[in-house]
Image (tube, grey):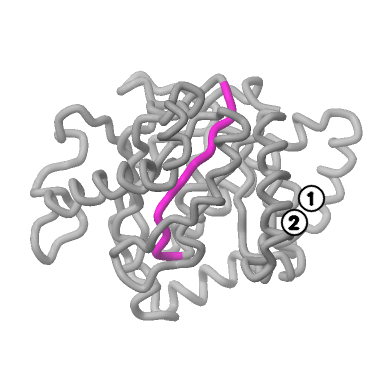
C-alpha cells in the first residue's frame, strides 16, 4: 500500500512542479519545437522510471534492436495493466504518441503533458470520433511521430488477449509504416490483481520483428490485426513456456539474455540518446524524429 501512496504522491508532485516547466517548454517551442518535444519526452520518461523504481518493478527487454531507427512506426501491444503504458513509454526511442481513452484526457495537468507529447484521446463509443483520431494518428506518423496502440480496446481481465480491433491498425495501412509488435508479460501482478496494493514484480517486454506493411500482399494487409496479434501471442507463449511454475522473475531459470536468437537488456541499461554496444541496443538519435 505504501508503494502505491508514494507512487501517486510522486506523480502528483511531478505534475505540480511541472507547471512552470510547461511554461518554459512552451517558450522553448517558440524557438525550437524539436528541442521542446525531445526534452518533454525525456522528462516524462525519467518520471516513469522513478515510478517503476518506487513500485519495485524490474523489466527485462528483449528485441529492442528490432525497432527501426530511421522512420516512425506503429507500436502494437497487448494490454493488462496501466503499467504497460508506463513501462513501454519509458523505452520509446523517439517521439511517440499513445492513443488513450477519452476519460484520461479529462485529468488536469496530465492531459496537457499528454497533448504536448502527441497523445490522442479516443471515445470508443463514438465511431465517427474514433475514425477521426485514427486519421489524425496517421498524419502524425507521416510527420515522423510514432504511435502506440493497444488494439484490444481496454485492459484485459486475464492473461488471454481479446481480439484486436482491426480498425485501429488502419493507420499502418494508410501510411505504410512498419508495425512493431510488443509482447508485455506479467504486468498484471504489479497492481491489477490486487489494486490498490502495489507488489514488486519482474516483467518482460519483447519487441518483435517489424512487419513492413508496404511489402505485404493485399490479402495480408486486410488481415493486419490477426497477423500482428498472432506475432504477439507467439512471443507471449514463448515467455510462458520458459517461466518456471510459481516464478515470474526469470525465464526457465535463466536470464532472457541466454534465450537463443534474442537480445535482452534491463531497462536501467537503456539510456535515451546513448547507443549500447551489447546487441546494438540503444536509443535512436533525437535528430531522427520530428
Q: Are marks 2 and 1 in contact (CB under 8 Å)?
A: yes
Q: Which residue is mark 2?
A: 18
**Residue drawn where x is 76% and y is 29% of the image:** 34
Residue shown at the point (18%, 46%) measured from the top left: 238
Residue 78 magenta-highlighted: yes
SS under mark 1: helix
Q: Is residue 275 left or right of residue 18?
A: left
- Kindly report the secondary structure that dominates the magenta region of the rendered protein: loop
The percent coordinates of residue 252 (x first, y second) are 9, 49
- Left or right position of 129 against 192: right
Q: Is residue 165 above or below residue 81?
A: above
Residue 23 on the magenta segment: no
Stretch in magenta: 71-81
Q: How many marks?
A: 2
Of 177 and 183, the residue lying toward us: 177
| Residue drawn at (31%, 22%) of the image | 278
Nearer to me, 28 or 78: 78
Q: CA distance from mark 2 to mark 1?
A: 5 Å
Residue located farthest toward the front when viewing the structure as drawn: 219
Residue 172 location in percent, x, y? 56, 36
Q: Which residue is mark 1?
A: 21
Amino acid at each position: 500500500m505504501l508503494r502505491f501512496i508514494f507512487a501517486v504522491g510522486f506523480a502528483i508532485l511531478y505534475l505540480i512542479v511541472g507547471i512552470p516547466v510547461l511554461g518554459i517548454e512552451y517558450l522553448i517551442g517558440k524557438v525550437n519545437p524539436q528541442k521542446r518535444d525531445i526534452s518533454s519526452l525525456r522528462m516524462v520518461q525519467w518520471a516513469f522510471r522513478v515510478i517503476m523504481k518506487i513500485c519495485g518493478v524490474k523489466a527485462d527487454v528483449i528485441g529492442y534492436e528490432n525497432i527501426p531507427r530511421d522512420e516512425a512506426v506503429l507500436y502494437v501491444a497487448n494490454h493488462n495493466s496501466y503499467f504497460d503504458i508506463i513501462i513501454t513509454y519509458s523505452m520509446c526511442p523517439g517521439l511517440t504518441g499513445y492513443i488513450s481513452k477519452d476519460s484520461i484526457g479529462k485529468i488536469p495537468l496530465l492531459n496537457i503533458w499528454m497533448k504536448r507529447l502527441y497523445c490522442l484521446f479516443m471515445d470508443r463509443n463514438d465511431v465517427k470520433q474514433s475514425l477521426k483520431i485514427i486519421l489524425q494518428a496517421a498524419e502524425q506518423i507521416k510527420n515522423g511521430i510514432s504511435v502506440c496502440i493497444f488494439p484490444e480496446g481496454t485492459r484485459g481481465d486475464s492473461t488471454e488477449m481479446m481480439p484486436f480491433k482491426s480498425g485501429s491498425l488502419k493507420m499502418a495501412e494508410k501510411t505504410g509504416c512498419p508495425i512493431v509488435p510488443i509482447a508485455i508479460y506479467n504486468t498484471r501482478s504489479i497492481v491489477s490483481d490486487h489494486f490498490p496494493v502495489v507488489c514488486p514484480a519482474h516483467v518482460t517486454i519483447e519487441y518483435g520483428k517489424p512487419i513492413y506493411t508496404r511489402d505485404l500482399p493485399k490479402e495480408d494487409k486486410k488481415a493486419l490485426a490477426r497477423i500482428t496479434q498472432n506475432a504477439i501471442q507467439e512471443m507471449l507463449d514463448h515467455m510462458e513456456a520458459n517461466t518456471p511454475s510459481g516464478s515470474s522473475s526469470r525465464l526457465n531459470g535463466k536470464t532472457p539474455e541466454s534465450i537463443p536468437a534474442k537480445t535482452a537488456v534491463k531497462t536501467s541499461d537503456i539510456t535515451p540518446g546513448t547507443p549500447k554496444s551489447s546487441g546494438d541496443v540503444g536509443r535512436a538519435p533525437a535528430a531522427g524524429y520530428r
